[in-house]
Amino acid sequence: MLKKHKTLGEFIIENQSAFQYTSGELSKLINAIRLAAKVVNHEVNKAGLVDILGAAGDMNIQGENQQKLDVMANDIFIQTLKNREIVCGIASEEEDDFITINSSDDNHQNKYVVLIDPLDGSSNIDVNVSVGTIFSIYRRVTPVGTPVELRDFLQKGDEQVAAGYIVYGTSTMLVYSTGAGVNGFTLNPALGTFYLSHPDMKFPESGKIYSINEGNYVHFLQGVKDYIKYCQEEDEDRPYTSRYIGSLVSDFHRNMIKGGIYMYPKSNIAENGKLRLLYECNPMAYLAEQANGIASDGFRRILDIEPTELHQRVPFFCGSKNMVEKLHECIAKHA
Ligand code: P6P
């Protein structure tokens, strides 16, 4: 008898009551993200083909103007979320400013804001390496019935009501949390259905994988350099393994399953690091903590940082508790 895996739809309904806000709202949001994920997955998986067939010019096989995939992913998520009566605003890495979404009664009745990186690591598409979508969900702080404002988006990561990612890898997975642990769902492309494949995901307390772009080594803080050397020296549990895909979602996902630490420090070339606080670091930090991991900027808990700008960058260190704490020790020695 085939063990029946729970579908994402069944899981959402079962856990709807656990969501601390009115029932059904989260379902609409996650269902919109689920649908958009399937559409983006389809586009991402045929990207190479379209490039080949579209080589004749900038027209693709359907005769449409070929969009960059991250722009296309952005449009798909925004359109899908707009169609639900629940989102009053969206901020995206692909949009300079936030987008106001009015309710169909024109009275701004929708309660949630969504922040997204629609296709993180999209430069990897051209070399057939996995990419991801990252999303972060808050309740608005300005009164329902008024247009959404910037302060609805500039909320601390601690205020998130849900966050997650889709990783378009060897298989496509949707991994998310609403504050009661992290669950991973794998898409069966033949059926277009996500199945619960990774219930209650947790970072191992320790790990042996460190992920960082060592090409920037000379620019790192001395404490980060010391930690990298710690990972590399001979000892009972070391040297660790260096694994860096150049796709945050993929490195994070592997480290959560196997144990590891992801690091994107600040440097002379990236004075606040490269990753964006609102739609990359906050959602991944929320997931990390829900999975017993840690996420910091080297000094502060990511989820405590008061945002000041929509696209602000922060240094980002995230993963297995013991590994991030060891990094903090190395940094503190030089603080
Ligand atoms: P670098 C992709 O552009 C990204 O935002 C993350 O997904 C990835 O971990 C990082 O940047 C890669 O940056 O500077 O090492 O190429």
Image (cartoon, helix red, strand yellow):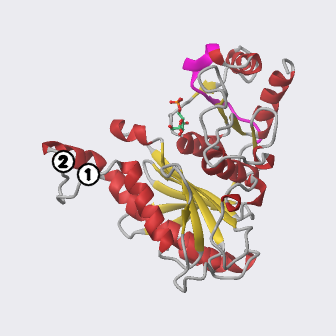
Give residue 12's position: percent from left, percent from top.
61, 75
Give residue 47's position: percent from left, percent from top.
30, 49
Q: Residue furthest left?
A: 56
Position of residue 109 relative to residue 222, above or below, is below
Q: Quadrant of residue 101?
A: bottom right
Q: Which residue is mark 2?
A: 54
In the depicted view, which residue is nearer to us: 26 or 205?
26
Q: Which residue is mark 1?
A: 66
**Position of residue 234 in the picture relative to residue 334 (left or right):** left
Give residue 182's position: percent from left, percent from top.
68, 59
In the depicted view, which residue is nearer to us: 52 or 100?
100
Position of residue 144 relative to residue 89, above or below, is below
Q: Residues within 10 Å of mark 2 (few under 14, many from 20)?
A: some
Query: Which amino acid is tagged 1?
Result: Gln
Q: Quadrant of residue 141?
A: bottom right
Q: Quadrant of the C terminus?
A: top right
Residue 56's disc number: none
Q: Nearer the viewer, mark 1 or mark 2?
A: 1
- Tag 1's secondary structure? loop
In reply to whether residue 85 is colored magenta, the answer given is no
Which residue occupies 68% across, 76% down?
15
| First to last magenta residue range | 205-218
Marks 1 and 2 sit apart, C-alpha to C-alpha, by 8 Å
Which residue occupies 40% across, 69% down?
192
Q: Are marks 1 and 2 in contact (CB under 8 Å)?
A: yes
- Tag 2's secondary structure? helix
